[in-house]
Image (cartoon, rainbow, N blue to C red):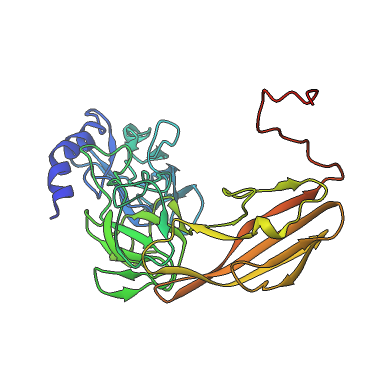
């Protein structure tokens, strides 16, 4: 008998007994002796007389099930004194009552006619539960640098069954990680499908990333005891997810006029060549680097050479506006991806620049 059963048995057995008050001519037997029932599992209930030397001869018994169904038939049916019930995969709550009722009529012994006390049933279910926030190495951020191949600890708080007292915990978890990442518990690579991990502590696992795969981490708490262990379909909670974003270094188009990057203007007569439009990168970790630069121009910005280098040759053709765009290949630890820089707009104004006098107290009127 597992710990869950040993702890719940004494208190729930008394609860089950209390639900069948003395003085009733009949009572509904509880095959689970007061313990929470598993959804999707058939339980056999029966109606018995409580007085010695009496029986249900001639009786018509009508069963009513709330929160479940009579196996293979409708919610309410007149049958013998035995009924098989399968409870729905919804936890017992004040708005989801789960109980079994019986009505007895037409008995040869009319004193048995009537209705026994309802049998209240507690359904353990995770179907409405969502695990708590996922963390990666203790952080709720799913940002991982592109090119990192590292070991991560993925954790969600342990999940409990709602309404069950004393506290009962989910006994397995279904984890989904990006394809190619490795589950370190057994060394298998993920295919992108969910993988079940057994045990109350399976709410925390270790994985190893690939250099480039992102997507999301997804976890569901699983009731293995009531589900697959009994050969039933998986009984799981709602999913909790965390997006995984592979962060990249910045790629920027800079110039002498805009050393931090961004658009800029030139006055009539100013040439673009001395501004040295070029590529700049920031936040590049060890082992990472850019290559395969590709500049493109439009409008009044023309190229005269070297668009596939970090320092293209560009010039102006008239007044107005033109754009410069840039993309480059970023590579780290064998993984590569294309990074695009924000485009810039270069404006050639028709007016000349306002003269700047370096000696502020110079009197132009003096000879």
Can you say whether 237 is above or below 301 in the image? above
Q: Which residue is drawn at 44% across and 37% down?
A: 96
- Horizontal side of 211 relative to 347 (left or right) equals left
Which image quadrant: the C terminus?
top right
In the image, what residue occupies the spot 12% across and 47% down? Answer: 6
**Residue nearer the viewer, 360 or 287:** 360
Q: Nearer the viewer, residue 289 or 189?
A: 289
Q: How many marks?
A: 0
Q: Of all residues shown, which one is farthest toward the front? A: 367
Which residue occupies the foreground of this view, 334 or 170?
334
Q: Where is residue 130 in the image (x, y as percent from the top left)?
A: 40, 45
In percent of the image, x 37 and y 52: which residue is there? 39
Query: Closer to the camera, 5 or 14?
Result: 5
Give the percent coordinates (x, y) of residue 317. 84, 60
The image quarter containing residue 284 is: bottom left
Left or right of 235 on screen, residue 342: right
Vertical relation: 163 (above or below) 315: above
Q: Quarter of the image containing the N terminus?
A: bottom left
* Left or right side of 131 for 32: left
Q: Specify whether residue 23 is in view.
A: yes
Q: Position of residue 139 (x, y in %)?
A: 33, 47
Up/down of 167 relative to 262, above or below: above
**For residue 253, what is the image quadrant?**
bottom right
Confirm whether residue 225 shows in the render: no
Image position, residue 309 (x, y; %)? 61, 72
């Amino acid at each position: 008998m597992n710990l869950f059963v040993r702890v719940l048995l004494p208190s729930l057995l008394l609860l089950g007994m209390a639900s069948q008050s003395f003085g009733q001519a009949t009572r509904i037997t509880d095959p689970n002796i007061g313990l929470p029932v598993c959804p999707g599992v058939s339980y056999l209930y029966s109606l018995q007389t409580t007085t010695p030397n009496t029986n249900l001869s001639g009786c018509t018994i009508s069963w009513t099930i709330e929160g479940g169904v009579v196996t293979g038939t409708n919610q309410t049916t007149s049958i013998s004194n035995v009924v098989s019930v399968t409870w729905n995969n919804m936890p017992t709550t004040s708005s989801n009552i789960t109980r079994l009722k019986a009505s007895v009529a037409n008995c040869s012994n009319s004193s048995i006619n009537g209705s026994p006390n309802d049998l209240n049933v507690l359904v353990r279910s995770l179907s409405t539960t969502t695990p708590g926030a996922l963390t990666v190495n203790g952080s709720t951020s799913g940002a991982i640098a592109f090119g990192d191949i590292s070991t991560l600890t993925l954790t969600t708080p342990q999940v409990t069954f709602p309404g069950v007292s004393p506290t009962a915990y989910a006994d397995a978890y279904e984890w989904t990680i990006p394809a190619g990442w490795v589950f370190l518990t057994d060394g298998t690579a993920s295919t992108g499908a969910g993988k079940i991990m057994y045990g109350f502590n399976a709410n925390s696992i270790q994985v190893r990333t690939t250099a480039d795969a992102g997507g999301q981490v997804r976890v569901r708490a699983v009731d293995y005891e009531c589900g697959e262990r009994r050969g039933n379909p998986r009984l799981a909670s709602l999913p909790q997810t965390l997006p995984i974003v592979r962060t990249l270094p910045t790629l920027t188009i800079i110039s002498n006029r805009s050393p931090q990057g961004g658009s800029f203007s030139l006055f009539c007569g100013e040439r673009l060549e001395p501004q040295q439009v070029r590529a700049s990168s920031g936040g590049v970790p060890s082992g990472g680097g850019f290559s395969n630069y590709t500049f493109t121009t439009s409008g009044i910005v023309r190229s005269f050479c070297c668009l596939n280098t970090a320092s293209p040759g560009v010039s102006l053709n008239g007044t107005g506006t033109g754009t410069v765009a840039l993309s480059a290949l970023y590579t780290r630890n064998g993984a590569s991806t294309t990074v695009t820089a924000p485009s810039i707009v270069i404006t050639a104004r028709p007016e000349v620049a306002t003269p700047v006098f370096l000696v502020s107290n110079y009197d132009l009127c003096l000879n």
